[in-house]
Image (cartoon, grey):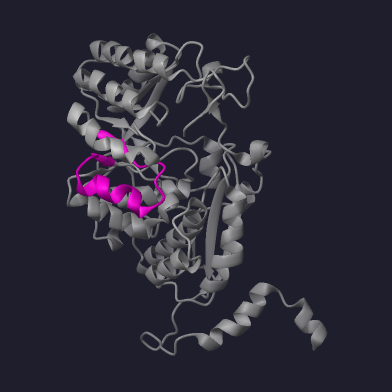
Amino acid sequence: MAKKQAKTTKTEAIEQIIPDAWPKYAAAGKDPVRIRDVRVILTAPDGIRLVIVKIETSEPELYGLGCATFTQRPLAVVEAIEQYLKPMAIGRDVHDSEDLFQAGYLSSYWRSGPVLNNALSGLDMALWDIKGKLAGMPVYQLFGGKSRRAANVYVHASGRDFAEVEESAKAYWDEGYRYIRCQVAVPNSATYGVSGKSMQAAYHLDPQQDAWDPDAYARIVPRLFDHIRARMGDEVELLHDIHERVPPITAIRIAKEVEPYRLFFLEDPFAPEDNGYFPLLRQHSSVPIAMGELYVNQAEYVDLVKDRLIDFMRVHLSDIGGLTPARKLAAFCEYFGVRTAWHGPGDASPVAHAANLQLDLNTPNFGIQEAYLPPDRTREVFPGTPEIRDGQMWSNEQPGLGIDLDEKRAAKYPYPDHALNGAWPPIRLKDGTVQRP
C-alpha cells in the first residue's frame, strides 16, 4: 500500500481528494461539468514564445483554450499555473469562472503582477471557451451579442525613410486597410517599430551598437506625418506609437507638433510611472491618446478613464487577467467615452486574438483592433485563427472562442534559445543609460 501511494502523482492525489469536497448539487439531475486537468502547452511557430492553457473536463471531448503568454518570462507563468492555480482549479465546476478568477487573484495575497495575471488569463479564457461550446454559440453571444458585423483593424507601415513608409502605407491602402500606423527609422539610432539595423538593441555598453536618441526621434516624427498626410490625403487614418521612449515633456511636445496631421491616435506617450503628466498633455494637445499596453494593475488606469485623460484603452488582455476583467474594463470605459483598442501584437497568441475579437464584436465602445497577420505555419498550429479581410477582422461563428490547437504541429516549434532569459533587450541612450520601457 505504501508503494502504491509513493507512485501516486500530484494530479491523481488531487483527484482523489477533491471530489469529496464537491458541492452536493446537480442541474436537471446531471452532475456539473468539472475541470479534470489543466495543461500548459509551449510553442513558438513564429519564433515568439507562446504559453497556451488547455483545460480538460469531465466530458472527454470538451476542452477550452486560453492564452497565458508573457513572452519575456514564460517559464515563470508555467510555474504559477502548474504549482498554484492548477491544484485549486481541478474538480471545480467549469461555470465558476468568476469565482475562480477572484480566488486565484487573491490567493497570492500580493497581486496585480504580469506573471500571476497571465496565469489567471490562461484559465479564464479557457473557461469562457468552454462556456461558449456548452452553449453552442460564440463567446460574444454570451456577452450580449454583436454590436457590429466585424472589427476594424490597423496595420503597421514602417521604413528606413519617409519614402519607404509611404510605399508601405500605400500598399496597405490598396489592400483595403484604412487605419495605418506609421513608424520611421531615425538615422544612426535604435528605433522602435522599424526592422533592420536601426532596430538593433544596445545590449550592453558597446559604442559599436546603435543607441537610442530621443531628441532626434522627436524631431523626425512631425516631419514624417507632414510627408504622409500630404501624399495620402485626408481619408487615411494615421496612428503612431511613441512606446514610452522619450521624457514626458518631450512626448507632450510631439503631441503638440503632430496635431495638424489629425492622427487617429498617438499611442503610449508616457510610461505607467508617469501617469501624472496626462493632465498637462490634455492642456496642450487635442490629439487622441491611446494608453495601457503596460498596465497590469487596475489602479493604473482608473483615474485616467474617469478623468477623461485618454481616448483609447490599449491593455493586453492576458496581462490584466483575461476576458473576465477585460469585460469589466470595457464597460467602465463606456461610461466615460473611452474606446477600446486592445493590444494585438505577435506575442499575443492566436488564442488571445480570438478573445480580443469576441470583445470587439460585442463592446459598444469599440474603437479599433491592432491587426495580427500570422504566417501560414502559425495558422496551421492554430486552426480557426481570426481572418482579416477588407481591413476588418471577422468571426468564424464557431462555438466558444472559435479557435483550436493542433498539438502535434505545435510540438514541431519548440521555444528558441532563451537569450537573456527571454528578456526584452535593453535600449540605451548614447551615454549607456538604459531607457524605458
Residue sitting farthest toward the right: 3
Q: Quadrant of residue 183?
A: top left
The residue closer to the viewer here, 189 or 34, is 189
The residue closer to the viewer here, 423 or 204, is 204
Above or below 101: residue 149: above
The residue drawn where x is 28% and y is 60% is 141
Residue 356 lies left or right of residue 36; in this view the side is left
Residue 162 lies left or right of residue 59; in this view the side is left
The residue drawn where x is 46% and y is 17% is 213
Q: Quadrant of the N terminus?
A: bottom right
Residue 148 visible? The answer is: no
The residue drawn where x is 44% and y is 67% is 106
Does the stretch in magenta take in 298? yes
Above or below 381: residue 161: above
The x and y percentages for residue 429 are 51, 21
The x and y percentages for residue 94 are 44, 72
Does the stretch in magenta take in 209? no
Residue 93 visible? The answer is: yes
Above or below 326: residue 220: above
Question: Which residues fall within the magenta stretch?
Answer: 289-312
The residue drawn where x is 34% and y is 29% is 248
Residue 414 lies left or right of residue 364; in this view the side is right
The residue closer to the viewer here, 363 or 303, is 303
The x and y percentages for residue 14 are 61, 78
Q: How many marks?
A: 0
The x and y percentages for residue 216 are 41, 14
The residue closer to the viewer here, 285 or 411, is 285
